[in-house]
Amino acid sequence: MDLSTIRNKLQKKDKSHYSAPEELVTDVRLMFWNCAKFNYVSLVISVCSEKNTEWFFIPSQPDSEVAEAGRCLDEFFEDKLKEIYPDRHFPSMQQDDSDCEEVE
C-alpha cells in the first residue's frame, strides 16, 4: 500500500473507491506497517508446530530517518483519528492483513 493508491481510492471515479472510513483507516495503517517492515530493524520469530513453521515479522526500532518519519506520521495519524472520530473504534490491523510476504 502506498500514498498514490490511497489517493486514487479517495476519488469517486475510481471503481475501488473507499465506501467507509474503516477502509481508508485500514489502508493507511497498512502503509505504515509496510514502512516499518522495510525501514525498521526487525525481529523475525518462528513458531514451530507438528504441521508447519510460521514466521512472524516484528518491527522493533527505526533504522533510518525515513523509518523515524514513518513512525511519527503513524502516531500523528492515530492521534488525529481519535480527534476526528472520538466515539468510534477502528479495529487494529492484524499482522496477517499486511502486504508482507512470509519468510521462507
Image: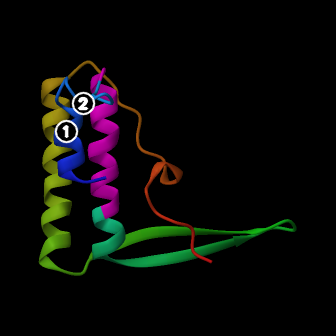
102 drawn magenta:
no
Of helix, strand and loop, which one carries label 1? helix
What's the CA distance linking mark 2 and mark 1?
A: 6 Å
Q: Nearer the viewer, residue 31 or 75?
A: 31
Give residue 3's position: percent from left, percent from top: 18, 50
Q: Nearer the viewer, residue 57 or 97?
A: 97
- Highlighted range, magenta: 19-34
Amino acid at circle 2: Asp
Residue indicated by mark 1: 8
On screen, residue 2 versus residue 90, left or right, reads: left
22 drawn magenta:
yes
Q: Is residue 5 above or below residue 64?
A: above
Give residue 31's position: percent from left, percent from top: 29, 53
**Which of pointers 2 and 1 lies earlier in the amino acid sequence?**
1
Give residue 23's position: percent from left, percent from top: 33, 31
**Magenta stretch prevailing secondary structure:** helix
In the picture, the quarter occupied by the C terminus is bottom right
Q: How many marks?
A: 2
In the displayed orientation, state which residue is furthest to the right: 50
**Residue drawn at x 31%, y 27% as measured from the top left:** 15
Q: Are marks 2 and 1 in contact (CB under 8 Å)?
A: yes
Give residue 1's position: percent from left, percent from top: 31, 52
Of helix, strand and loop, which one carries label 2? loop
Residue indicated by mark 2: 14
Q: Count residues near mark 1 (Cα–Cα under 10 Å), then give few for <14, some for 14-19, many for 20+.
A: some
On residue 100, the disc is none
- Quadrant in the rendering for residue 87: top left
Q: Is residue 74 above or below residue 36?
A: above
